[in-house]
Amino acid sequence: MKVLIIDDEIDICYLLSSILKQNNCQTQFVNNLADAIEELKNSSPLIVFLDNHLPDGLGIEFVDHIKENYPAIKIIMITAYDTIIERQHAISKGVDIFLGKPFTKENINTAMEKLIN
């Protein structure tokens, strides 16, 4: 299963990749929305891990782009800005799962199980 990680924190990208590879996922990561647009054109991820605060925009606004162009992709939003308002906004935009940072391996595994099953 292909997974794309969109996060500007390299450590988060490596951590998520490591966790996901243990679950037999193929991972790719990019650090901004411009690169994410290109990566989505070139690959076919089933799941996107999307940070909200990126150097070139907000992930929450990028959800529309993903849903319009790749409606089958499932989105897991990961953000340090974990408030009820942020969660509700993300879910209303079409985010499948919202995870606050810091997250655990168990959080990631549980989220993946929910999306796969």
Image (cartoon, grey):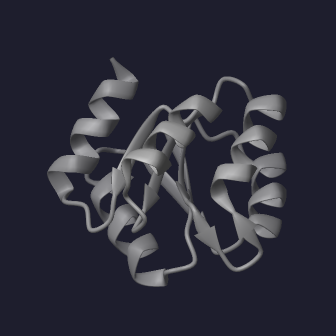
Q: Position of residue 77 (x, y in %)?
A: 49, 50
Q: Position of residue 16 (x, y in %)?
A: 37, 63
The residue sitting at 33% across, 17% down in the picture is 117
The residue sitting at 84% across, 33% down in the picture is 69
Residue 30 seen in the figure: no
Q: Quadrant of residue 7?
A: bottom right
Q: Position of residue 79 (x, y in %)?
A: 44, 62
Residue 92 seen in the figure: yes
Q: Residue furthest front?
A: 85
Q: Position of residue 29 (x, y in %)?
A: 58, 66
Where is 43 relative to 81, above or below?
A: above
Nearer the observer, 61 or 50: 61
- Left/right placement of residue 84 relative to residue 48 reads left
Where is 105 relative to 110, above or below?
A: below
Q: Residue furthest left?
A: 106
Nearer the observer, 30 or 43: 30
Total numbered badges shown on the rendered structure: 0
The residue sitting at 43% across, 65% down in the picture is 81
Q: Quadrant of residue 17?
A: bottom left
Where is 82 relative to 94, above or below?
A: below
The residue sitting at 65% across, 57% down in the picture is 59
Q: Residue furthest top?
A: 117
